[in-house]
Amino acid sequence: MAKVGKRTAAARSQFEGKSNVTVEEAVSLVKSNAKAKFDETIEISMVLGVDPRHADQMVRGTVTLPNGTGKTVRVAVFARGEKADEATAAGADIVGAEDLMEQVQAGNINFDRCIATPDMMGIVGRLGKILGPRNLMPNPRVGTVTPDVKQAVEDAKGGQVQFKAEKAGVVHAGIGKASFDAKQLEENLKAFVDAVSKARPSGAKGTYMKKVSLTSTMGPGVSVDIASATGN
């Protein structure tokens, strides 16, 4: 049996016997046990009653968290001419066309969000096998294929979070940092849950939200009462 460190054992003891707690209690528990030497990310995971292998059960979308994510997001934009200039002025970290495609093909993926103007999709489409598995492929459904690159860059830099159901219908994302105050994390959590709720696909049958959990990067997790998270 693997040896459990004192810090881990102490953290786990704080969570024993607690499940389906309110949003407020979950945030308090997770924050108080985020004691790593770095500012841990507070992460939410949701188990949904969907099978994302079916197109009519795919859950994906975006939400701008009211208090941001606390993370510096590096943004790459595929654009030319005036649109490239707009992207740069808006704060994009990397802007290019064929040259950016070559960087990606060479494995130089130094960005967290990828945006493209519609006319660049002929180039970007060649990168599907590289960007797709990393959830970086631009998509009009989440606003990353758009002629309004200025707004898209500002949204990405301003705390917008993308979400997408993975295998077993799990959606997860970072909703802030341990250094955030409790109120900020509570507001971000509820905003994220609300966005996922509104993204319920037409093919979802039965119970849509099955489980909501909160954790920090290095800490244990706790399940959150769904009614508390949704405000019902």
Image (cartoon, grey):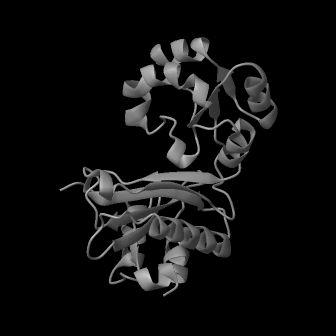
- Image quarter of residue 103: top right
Q: Give x and y (percent) for residue 133.
A: 37, 35
Residue 95 against residue 146 in the figure, above or below: above
Q: Position of residue 33 (x, y in %)?
A: 50, 68
Q: From this viewpoint, is residue 225 visible? A: no
**Residue at the extreme bottom:** 232
**149 relative to 196, above or below:** above
Among the 4 quarters of the image, the one containing residue 172: bottom left
Residue 105 visible in the displayed image:
yes
Q: Nearer the viewer, residue 139 or 106?
A: 139
Q: Give the left or right position of residue 88, taking residue 96 as reference.
A: right
Total numbered circles = 0
Residue shown at the point (65%, 45%) measured from the top left = 156
Q: Quadrant of the N terminus?
A: bottom left
Residues 155 and 141: in front is 141
- Where residue 114 appears, as percent x and y from the top left, is 57, 34
Q: Going 66% across and 24% down the picture, which residue do you hit?
A: 79
User: At x 47% / y 53%, what residue is drawn?
Assistant: 163
Q: In this view, does 128 lie to the left or right of 49?
A: right
Whole-percent x, y for residue 32 in the image = 55, 71
Q: Is 204 left or right of 184, judged from the image as shown?
A: left
Looking at this view, name the residue that lies furthest to the left.
Answer: 1
Q: Is residue 208 above or below residue 94?
A: below
